[in-house]
Image (cartoon, helix red, strand yellow):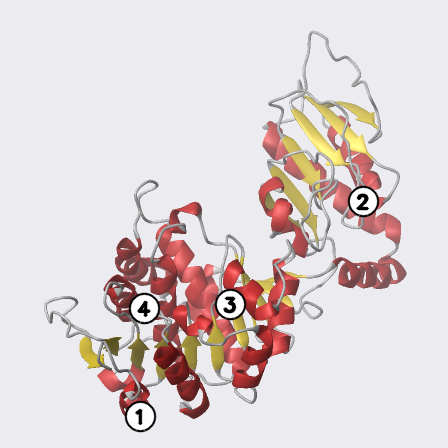
Amino acid sequence: MIPVVTVGEMRSLDELAHRDVGLQVLVERAGHAVGQRALLLLGGGYGHRVLVIAGKGNNGEDGRVAAGFLMDRGVAVDIVPPDYSEIPGMPASYSYDLIIDAAYGTGFHGVYRPPSVPKGVPVLAVDIPSGVNGDTGEGSGSPLQAMETVVMAALKPGLIQGDGARLSGRLYVADIGIDASKTANIHVIEDRDVAEKIPSRDRDAHKWTSANCIVAGSPGMMGAAFMSASGSLRAGAGMVRLMTFGQRIDSSLIPEVVKIPIGGSEDRDDWSNGVLEEVSRCKSLVIGPGIGRSPETVSGVKRLLQEVTIPLVLDADGLYALGSHREAADILAGRNNIVLTPHDGEAARLAGHPMSSNRIEEAQNLADLLGVTVLLKGSTTVVTDGGGRTYVVTSGSPRLASAGSGDVLSGIIGGFIARCACSDRSDLAFVAALAAHVHGRASQLGKPEGLVAMDIPELVAEWMSTVGLSHAS
């Protein structure tokens, strides 16, 4: 995992490092790291021109050290302040090969209007694109779009959410001698985390060892059920018991899945009894995709939340059954093995207010409010247990912006929980984050255009077989 620290946490780490090694040493290290990345982007030194926009603070000092580093290697460098209105030599017969944005760092407040720079020239940002809030990722004014950002010591929340995720480009974390790993409570999931956590099947394993029960689908909404079940199977669930409302299912559809009708289309009062009987041999339960929102369905979901003891994933219509934020807190009280998977609209209803750009903080607050693990879906997905552990997933892509992809994700989460046989709240958060990471990485193997949700399960199996579980024999 990659550690992420808030602006306040980084400030404390800086102060400790200043006392241990001195500010100037840190500035030299940071400036050299920027200079080295600049040389790589330029493809060499001599014959190139670089513009450095340098502010008065430490960020600007990093830029000035980088400028000296580059000049020593034959690069022609111009340095201007953040409020400079006319770039030297522009217009002129030459142009710049690179712009280094060292105007302001993560602690900037206000509105940033950069100098008018030539279009099409790549930008290398120092720590964060100037004008972007280091915690929320919200951009103010007109920050420059960076091709790459050299990040000092550790990622900041503003680099991986909001405008910052778009403006920062590729992120390169520079080692300047500050260890943030012991301080960070937020981490970005990496590929290797999947291999280290998700177990290979034991030689003595059988289908019930990692069985997942899914309550999904109703007349007109059977696609949600099949997508969730397929995601669970391809994520490694040894047995999937799919319970659907109101109709018998063609056995030829996903033949590996055990299909169990529950509740008549008119009367669903007793449907939760059937689920309680089924889950006794399962390791996880997923409730919600396509089950509908009838009063009988809602009351049954509430009953299951009270009586089911195995880890439970609540998605889609299952989240609707929680009602408002006040109702949800009462329903979920005392349950620490539940994972909620809302998108922004569902999260807003559960939180009682619209989601802000600070998705990390919003997810943490919602998990604290409800006392369960929350997976806030989006381009930057945030998973948190509400107890201090937060995981950020950046593997998602616009390819996943299609109907049903969230249903597949709920199935993957259920499958992973069953494989890991986890029940601890912090463990559930980590496993759910791994599922979201695999969901995103698998989509990257698919077609750039026209990817649909039912393509994803097969891609999940492919990615895990070739990358995610490469340690398995």
- The residue pinned by badge 1 equals 280
Between the C-alphas of marks 4 and 2, the distance is 47 Å
Amino acid type of the residue tagged 3 in the rendering: Leu
Label 1 or label 3, whichever comes before in sequence order: 1
Label 3 or label 2, whichever comes before in sequence order: 2
Q: Position of residue 334 (x, y in %)?
A: 56, 89
- The residue pinned by badge 2 equals 28
Label 2 or label 1, whichever comes before in sequence order: 2
Answer whether residue 74 is visible to the viewer in this image: no
Of the numbered discs in the image, which one, if any, rests on residue 375?
A: 3
- The residue pinned by badge 4 equals 235
SS label for mark 1: helix
Between the C-alphas of marks 4 and 1, the distance is 21 Å
In the image, 445 versus 267, the foreground residue is 267
Amino acid type of the residue tagged 4 in the rendering: Ala
The answer to the question of whether label 3 and label 4 lie on touching residues, with beta carbons closer than 8 A, is no
User: With 81 as the anchor, is 450 left or right in this view?
Assistant: left
Amino acid type of the residue tagged 2 in the rendering: Glu
In the image, 278 versus 88, the foreground residue is 278
Amino acid type of the residue tagged 1 in the rendering: Ser
Mark 1 Cα-neighbour bin, 10 Å: few <14, some 14–19, many ≥20: few
Q: Does 162 sit above or below residue 265?
A: above
Q: Nearer the viewer, mark 2 or mark 1?
A: 1
At x 87% / y 43%, what residue is drawn?
57
Q: Nearer the viewer, mark 3 or mark 2?
A: 3
Q: Nearer the viewer, mark 3 or mark 4?
A: 3
The answer to the question of whether label 2 and label 1 lie on touching residues, with beta carbons closer than 8 A, is no
At x 26% / y 56%, what residue is drawn?
454
Label 4 or label 1, whichever comes before in sequence order: 4
SS label for mark 4: loop
Q: Nearer the viewer, mark 4 or mark 1?
A: 1
Answer whether residue 449 is visible to the viewer in this image: yes
